[in-house]
Amino acid sequence: MNFELISSDEFRKYADQSPYRSFTQTPEIAKYRESEGWTIYYFAVKEKEKILAAAAAFAKPTFLGKSIYVVPGGPLLDLEDTKLTNFFFKHLISFAKTHNGYALQISPYYELIERDRNGEVVENGFHHEKAVKNLERFKFKLCSDASQPRYLFVLDLNNRNAEELFSDFKRNTRNHIRKAEKQGVTIRELQKSELNYFKDITESTSLRRNFSDRPLSYYEKIYDLFHDRDEVKFILAEAEIDGKKTPLSAAMFMLYGNEIIYLFSGSDQKYMRDYNAQYLIQWHMIKYAAEHHFKCYNFYGIQGLPDPSSKDYGIYDFKKGFGGRVVELIGTYELPLNTFYYLHEFLSKFKKH
């Protein structure tokens, strides 16, 4: 086996067919990171020119001229293949150490344990504990603060058509969809020049619910990078109110590989109860997923395992209404590469106090 740098085109060809692919492991996301000052490296393990594993790694000086290396949504490899995992990380760690790195962070798009829609462990389901042991062998430690969510909610389509999927929704969810339709809510895809409609809704929602929103320039860049590849959609729900078309709800979706990912959204609070537009957006995209033969519809993050006492339980409950299951990913792991890591950690804690 050989460990080597490859081109973005060669990486894309492998990534597009990898069972561990993620939209965050694409040349488009790499280009976005590059615009923010990150240096991009595409690595691969090859055997007789065949790629066995790969990763897009991003490096950026963040502390005393030293760089953190991050692999969001990757690497793309079977972490339970001990020989391949050992070979890959041995060489990746060596590269990062010799190229000014003080830390390596990875966020594999890799399921840990099989769970049902309530978050309960499935009896006799899979448990990829060997993958965790392979990472711990290199002294990787699990991060509590990570940008990639640890728990997702995913609807496996299983070749079902729209009618079959709709019949599996909870009764309240079906009723909300029908109500939105009766109220005259319509759905359309936004063009780049209309992204201000999306931004206005997500910004007001972020202020109401106290979370940070991305700037309009971010959404415009993502549109530019992915739209021509038909890998992003900005969807708007609107209705005629007081004689004019009024935006009610909006959402951003990534379409990559065999899944559609519901990523960002918001709703105008004034119209949420009367129009239920957010339900119609989900139904519109679930139908699209079924019609275009996607394998799963990813509602993306939920805040930990379902807990009725959690303030964010309503987000999980909304997603659960469409069917699906809880997905627990292996998590984000970080590896110190030298003493600069510990100095950085100490100073970061000192600043917080």
Image (tube, helix red, strand yellow):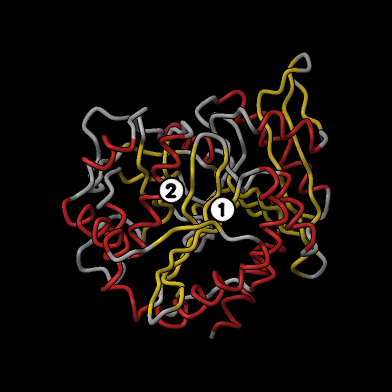
Q: Foreground residue, 75 or 265?
A: 265
* Residue 44 higher or lower than 116, as above or below: above
Q: Earlier in the sequence, mark 1 or mark 2?
A: 1
Which of the 4 quarters of the picture holds residue 158? top left
Task: Categorize mark 1 by other alpha carbons within 10 Å: few (<14), some (14-19), many (20+).
Answer: many
Left or right: where 150 falls relative to 62: left
Q: Residue at x 30, y 69 (%)?
A: 275
Q: CA distance from mark 1 to mark 2?
A: 10 Å
Residue at image mark 2: 285
Q: Amino acid at mark 2?
A: Met
Residues at badges 1 and 2 in contact (C-beta under 8 Å)?
Answer: yes
Q: Position of residue 112 (x, y in %)?
A: 40, 39
Q: Residue furthest left?
A: 171
The residue type indicated by label 1 comes to Lys
Quarter of image, res 39: bottom right
> Quadrant where the N terminus lies?
top right
Please, what secondary structure does the residue beneath circle 1 have? strand
Residue 71 x %, y %: 65, 48
Mark 1 sits on what residue? Answer: 233
Residue 48, label in figure: none
The picture places residue 206, in percent across and down from the top left corner, at 47, 77
> In front here: 188 or 307?
188
Q: Residue at x 31, y 68 (%)?
A: 312
Residue at the image position 24 percent from the left and 35 percent from the top: 122
Residue 286 in picture, x, y percent from top left: 39, 45
Direction from residue 6 to residue 315 in the image, left or right: left
Q: Residues within 10 Å of mark 2 (few under 14, many from 20)?
A: some
- Label 2: state its secondary structure: helix
